[in-house]
Structures are given as structure tokens and as C-alpha cells.
Image (tube, grey):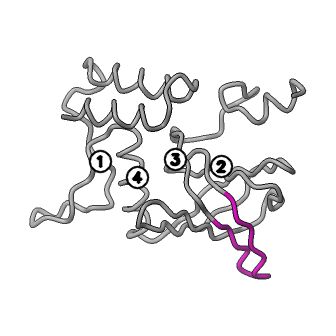
Amino acid sequence: MPQELQQRYFPTRRVGRERRTSPRYAFTATCDATEPKSGAKIVGRTSDLGRGGCYIDTIGPFPPGTNLVVRINRDNQTLRMAGKVIFAQPGMGMGLAFSENPADQKAILDQWIAELSGEPVAQPVTDSGASAGSRPATAPGAENSSFYVVNELILLLLQKGVLTEQEGKALLQKLLK
């Protein structure tokens, strides 16, 4: 693969300023993306997911700037998010940035991200007014604790392909117990 293509395709080899505002996690699920005005639709699979967007592996990506509605299917849940194509690689896929979306969809996304990242899963709405869609809290003092360090190490090993998605998820779940 030419070096220029490697630099654009692999997030760890990107050149230039990182534009993502939230981390991405290895995540494989079937999905489809539809352009609302024309109804044009592609089918693909996600390879990573974050609060800010996802990457969709597909042979025929939409061009950058296209507004889409993407449906991601995982287990028995479907996440439906509006977004915009940020970059496209013909024959490979496209990077999608999520737009503002309904709270119920954000709650599903937050739940999935919590599972992938090892964050405690958000609890449903309680009498105290806590929202199921709010960002899950981390362990007390997590940024200065071994919990945080081990969590980051597992995510780094996942990102570099040292651990499979299944191994990483199992380790993150053990870390939370």
C-alpha cells in the first residue's frame, strides 16, 4: 500500500492536526447509510466508533460533505444517527462525523462507548434526576489511579491490533468488577 494511502487510512499514522474531539474505539457492526434527499443508500460495516462519529467500510462511499442518516445494528439494538461525511476513500470507506441527534440515540451511543472504553455504564433515569443519556462517570480519581492507566493501556493495545476486540472487551469488563 502506498505510504500516502497508509497515512490517510490508519488513524495511528495520520499526518497533520487531529480533528477528532473524542476517542474512537475498535467496533465492528453492520450498518447502512442513506442520503435523505435522494434516498441513495449504501451498506457497509463500522470499523471504529466514538461519540463524535465512526468509520464505515464500504466500496462505494459518499463524497465528503454529504449529509447522511446512518443505522448501526449491534446485538438487538439499532443506533440511528445523522451525520456528515468528512472524508472518503473510494474502494475503502468513509469517515462520518455525527450531528446533533435525539437524546435516546445519544443514550444508546453512550452505552456502547461505555462498554468499549471500560467506563461504568450509565444508569437509567433515577429520582435524583440523573439522565441515562449523560456521559458515564469514571471511577473516583480515575485520572490519577492505576484504573485509568490500565484502561488506557488496554485501549492502546486494541488500537494497535495486539488484542482482538473480544479480548479487549473481556479485559475491560474484568477491570470494572
Q: Considering only order in the chain, which callout, 1 or 2, is on the residue closer to the N terminus?
A: 2
- Left or right: 173 as drawn, with respect to 54: left
Judged by depth in the image, the label closer to the viewer, 3 or 4, is 4
Q: Is residue 170 above or below residue 53?
A: above
Pick whichever, 151 or 30, lies toward us. Answer: 30
Instruction: Please tell me the numbered disc located at residue 50.
Output: 3
Query: Looking at numbered disc 3 in the image, what kind of residue is underneath it?
Result: Gly
Which secondary structure, mark 1?
A: loop
Picture coordinates of residue 118 (x, y %)? 33, 37
C-alpha separation, residue under disc 4 versus residue under disc 1:
11 Å
- Asked if residue 174 is among those painted magenta in the image, a careful observer would answer no
Q: Considering only order in the chain, which callout, 4 or 2, is on the residue closer to the N terminus?
A: 2
Query: Looking at numbered disc 4 in the image, what kind of residue is underneath it?
Result: Trp
* Magenta stretch, residue numbers: 32-44
C-alpha separation, residue under disc 2 versus residue under disc 1:
23 Å
Residue occupied by mark 2: 55
Pick whichever, 12 or 59, lies toward us. Answer: 59
